[in-house]
Amino acid sequence: MAPIESALRELNRLDLLAGGNSAVHRLDPRAKVFVTFAFIVAVVSLGRYELAALVPFAVFPVALAASAGLPATVILRKLLLVLPFAVVVGLFNPLLDRQPLLALGPLVISGGWISFLSIIVRSLLTVGAAVVLVAVTGFSGICMALERFGVPRPFVVQLLFLYRYLFVLADEGGRMVRARELRTFSGRGRGLKAYSALVGSLLLRTWDRAERIHMAMLSRGFNGQFHVRREIRPGRADWIFTAGWCALFVLFRLVNIPHLLGGLVTGGYP
């Protein structure tokens, strides 16, 4: 249970970072969500062998994190968690695609290794952008932006409930695990049967707590809509932010900047 509680604390820390007062934090959540979505689409749409073309896209998450003053260690820890999954996804690419694609002196690199590295870089870029988005917007701000973009309200409300009460569920489970450990000695009560009973008890307790929460919300006039403290309207900074980054993504997508700079340095382009 300790690793789950640690992961939830890290997730909650991202939401706490969203309470900052930088220029990026003050932007309209819709602008940040739209730009991040455009970034992910641009990164994913590149060919599987276009590894160098992915490098300029790192400017976006790095620039946002630096402008918002986000701790680099928090972002890096999240990326390290995703790295093993990306490695597993592309693990067999070098074995399935052995066609030579690049030669560095006597070293010949196959297309499988290029696509393998491309998967890892794409995963780090997209997950890094999503983590920075949560850290500068907050999960509630993201849900508000999704609703304004036309996502069905029931889906947005359920998504927000899932995030809010994930911490409540983990807290209930943590208390039950600690109570069980205090009542067990010499390894007794730690088998599969004990854990199945623990899961059943957790389900009943969360069901009861959900009913109490629902009744409390209805008694306070909840009608399926969340009201924000202040209405955010897009301003000049939001339009400049959206147009500027989207234009830069189009440039990175259409022009291979590293190859262009390499050709200029080596004299390959006039």
Image (cartoon, rainbow, N blue to C red):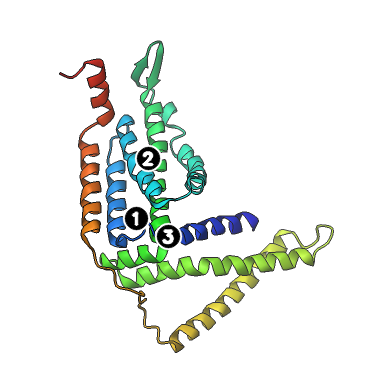
The reply to whether discs 3 and 1 touch (Cβ–Cβ < 8 Å) is no
Quadrant that contains the N terminus: bottom right
Q: Which residue is mark 1?
A: 24
Q: Find residue 219 and name its label.
A: none
Quadrant that contains the C terminus: top left
Q: Which residue is mark 3?
A: 20
191 horizontally vs 252: left or right: right
Is 161 placed above or below 54 here?
Answer: below
Q: Residue at x 55, y 59 (%)?
A: 8
Q: Position of residue 82 (x, y in %)?
A: 48, 45
Q: Position of residue 99 (x, y in %)?
A: 35, 21
The amino acid at mark 2 is Arg
Q: Position of residue 105 (x, y in %)?
A: 38, 11
| Residue found at the very far left of the displayed protein | 270
The amino acid at mark 1 is Val
State which quadrant residue 112 falls in: top left
- Element on which disc 1 rests: loop
Q: Residue at x 42, y 68 (%)?
A: 160
Question: What's the distance in space between the residues labelled 3 and 2, CA to CA?
Answer: 28 Å
State which quadrant residue 140 falls in: bottom left
Dot 1, how many residues are within 10 Å of its Cα: few (below 14), some (14-19), or many (20+)?
Answer: many
- Element on which disc 3 rests: loop
- Element on which disc 2 rests: helix
> Looking at the image, is mark 3 or mark 2 earlier in the sequence?
3
Is 157 placed above or below 189 here?
Answer: below
Q: Residue at x 68, y 68 (%)?
A: 176
| Residue found at the very far top of the displayed protein | 106
24 horizontally vs 95: left or right: left
Viewer-proximal residue, 231 or 81?
231
Q: Find residue 122 and name its label.
A: 2
The reply to whether discs 2 and 1 touch (Cβ–Cβ < 8 Å) is no
